[in-house]
Amino acid sequence: MLLLLGLCLGLPLCAGSLEDARIRDDTSEQVGPRVPRQARLLQRLKTKPLMTEFSVKSTIISRYAFTTVSCRMLNRASEDQEIEFQMQIPAAAFITNFTMLIGDKVYQGEITGREKKNGDKVKEKRNKTSEDNGEKGTDMFRASVVIPSKDKAAFLLSYEELLQRRLGKYEHIISVRPQQLVGRLMVEVNILERSGIESLEVLPLQHSRQKGSGRGEDDSGPPPSTVINQNDTFAKVTFKPSVVQQARIAQNGVLGDFIIRYDVNREQSIGDIQVLNGYFVHYFAPKDLPPLPKNVVFVLDSSASMVGTKLRQTKDALFTILHDLRPQDHFSIIGFSNRIKVWKDHLVSVTPDNVRDGKIYIHHMSPTGGTDINGALQRAIKLLNDYVAHNDIEDRSVSLIIFLTDGKPTVGETHTLKILNNTKEAARGQICIFTIGIGNDVDFMLLEKLSLENCGLTRRVLEEDDAGAQLIGFYDEIRTPLLSDIRVDYPPAVVEQTTRTLFPNYFNGSEIVIAGKLADRKVGQLHVEVTASNSKKFVILKTDVPVEPQRAGHGETGSARPQAGAEPRNHVERLWSYLTVKELLSSWRHSRDEQDRERLRQKAQALALAYRFLTPLTAMHLRSAGQPEKLEEAQGVSAAEGPETVMQSLRGASPQPGPAFKKPYSPRIKVSKTSVDGDPHFVVDFPLNKLTVCFNIDGQPGDILRLVSDHADSGVTVNGELIGAPAPPGGHKKQRTYFRTITILVNKPERSYLEITPSRVILDGGDRLVLPCNQSTVVGSRGLEVSVSANANVTITIQSTIAFVILVHLYKRPAPYQRDHLGFYISHSEGLSGNCHGLLGQFLNQDAKLTEEPAGLSKDPTHPLLPKAGEQSETVLKVKGHQVPVVWKQRKIYNGEEQVDCWFARNNAAKLIDGEYNDYLAAHPFDSETSFGPGRSRGL
């Protein structure tokens, strides 16, 4: 098997393009009658790999995003074929996992320290197409593998990133470029922000610039099929275009970037500080402050290479920027090629006359000569230093250089290290340099180091981009400085490690993020103090943040490595490790001392390995992970661990000493008939009346149904999320739906969250544990017990009075209309209240009876009201005040092991259930709101 993986710079290639190239070569060499063009096209289409599914799921918790991409492909050709999976990921993201399923074999990614020999590792070349610019810097991940004829491959890629705030908004960008029309395409984004979501919008798809990429019919709003569900602190956005909708956007499957833009509420001037299990994060983004005056020098490359569109667009952008300067600002302009041309030998105030003269000077710039980067920077720094030294500036101000070039140093000092040294020595940390590189020939590494070493930022503009718009957008981010010399202090006796705490400037619409690790997790509060300069005064902000007691089961103090067999303990710890690795890598890249570089390299590599980050200092090996039933079983850390390792991670969650494992339940467990299973088929048992009622619910894939709603009384909520599948041939249905995920919220005595899928159980009740469904496991604490019987069922017991059993249905070789799914059975319901509702819950503790006898009923006393064989008489069922026409039928439950007689309510149970279908739709998996009865609540 040929395997090629990489993370590199490059434009997307169509999946199957290598195979297409071979076909063209073979065709060109054929001897004989010419093959008609249509026949050749059909030949190519038949052999092109088919992508059957492309899905992306992101979960954003307090600006930190976890994203997983899943792709399934089929080799339809009659010969082995190379299949390529590719995904654009944000340049700032770290890949944390990659898994391949080829036929029935799983290959799991393992992060290791990078060695000199590359071998078959996943390579990461961080040659960014653009670094955090307005056009969204991305890296391209590619994985190619040769697949046997008629076989399948599946790819799973996970990455993490911290969303940056720009111009007052966070942007989450997902590349949707499957390179062909896909039968099942879905993007799902869940956002949870503790401080509240102030605004949220989904932008039109940002399309690829490649030839052949189309545009949607309507680019004025969210993409077609986008659904947004939102409350104060939670939002769920789904994008599930049909094949027809995809074709209207782009026939070639290059849909573009799916972009969500949002912001959060900000009430405290000192910021939002979150402390969780020994780690904290501090988001600082003050508002309603007067802007600081700017002293700014615009340095514009006017060398010969800037001729034409680039220089014209740049001039137009500077015209706009000059008009945007405030009256308290001061500015000057420098044009440079092999000569340095200064408009004024001093900074001037912003007046209509000065702005007009500056525009005239820019207008007359002409491209000629080479590129003297060092000379231009030295002259700009001298202008700013002279202005600050010779003027009695009453207000505190910010000195900036905005530097734009499209090339490399060719005149004057051309040695990169000397340019950096000269610039840093002249600026002395008092001047921030913001650089923009245009095109492919620019020395972007030099510009990046210039900005990094001089408290600035850098952007890269591609050759075909609108340089003027990019320059204006970049300037908008730094046009309004609000604070300077920001310092954030935490007590050294309490805080063991922090990320960067000194910042030269804070610009309106951005955000300062600091993360740290507590030295003493038993401390009662965290003292935070922020000092900064604003215009004519110093600003001092102080607060004390309460720290909750450390929960059991989180390992030893100071341990950085997550426990084996458990998912990351909390998002705050992941964010801390992410920022720390980023800062260590940045310092390592730009350090000039060899010993210091080695020290930084070792620290960055160790932390990246501990948290499974793929970085320039780590590599990814693919290891065979056996033959699980589903790809998702190899997704989490725990899926590859043995029972002994899992046991160690679960002991901390058990209140009793000793192993947490007990004898698992039998796979052939018998429980109450009250259940929902299959397509989905609902069964409700009324044991006192010796009646069983059944009904179907024809939902839509992606809908989340409320099954049991008793949040206000017993504190229990059960929801189920549907997935879709094609209907069997010849059936009356257009599609099938199954429950793919069951979520359970337990609110008493303490809040716990459970998410069950056919491959794993996630239990979050202080600890976040992942229990694979292919291993028998029992764990319990605080009145909640979870028992997994391998590849059979999951039993949830709550306070010994409520028990649910979830049957796991797996298919080794599923038919097209089959999906791995779950069945939900209520085993014990004594602890649920009389106010319980939901599609199943509303019938618990209720009476039902048949109000009239249909003709021809059997007189067998052991089976009351059962029609004789061959008769389908209709009768009327009375339950909860409803009178419902029903017919008798038989239905199989317990995975087909038992057949029950039941009275069937037709028409989607319209007359049987309270309300209508839409009343049972949940906004998100753990939504506890209900529309019925005294237990009505507003959810989480």
Image (cartoon, grey):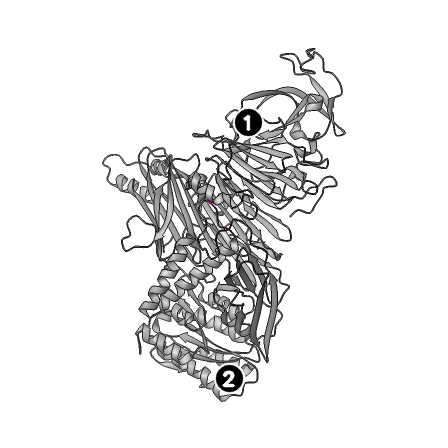
* Dominant secondary-structure state across the stretch colored magenta: loop
Establish if 481 lies above or below 931: below
Q: Amino acid at mark 2?
A: Val
Q: Which is nearer the eye, 405 or 659?
A: 659
227 lies left or right of 87: right
Q: Local crowd at mark 2 within 10 Å, few (<14), some, or many (≥20)?
A: some
Q: Which corner quadrant of the image does residue 353 belong to?
A: bottom right
Q: Position of residue 484 (x, y in %)?
A: 53, 75
Q: Which corner quadrant of the image does residue 2 belong to?
A: top left
Establish if 18 lies above or below 206: above
- Residue range highlighted in magenta: 565-569
Q: Which is nearer the eye, 234 or 250?
A: 234
Distance of mark 2 from mark 1, alpha carbons? Answer: 84 Å
Establish if 294 lies above or below 597: below
Asked whether 566 falls inside the magenta stretch, the response is yes
Residue at label 2? 348
Q: Which mark is residue 728?
A: none
493 lies left or right of 911: left
Q: Position of residue 187 (x, y in %)?
A: 51, 46
Tally of numbered tags: 2
Q: Local crowd at mark 1 within 10 Å, few (<14), some, or many (≥20)?
A: few
Kindly identify the residue that appears in the image at 41 percent across and 53 percent down. 610
Q: Which mark is residue 669?
A: 1
Asked whether 599 falls inside the magenta stretch, the response is no
Q: From the image, which quarter does the N terminus lie in?
A: top left
Label 1 residue SS? loop
Q: Are marks 2 and 1 in contact (CB under 8 Å)?
A: no
Establish if 503 lies above or below 157: below
Q: Amino acid at mark 1?
A: Ile
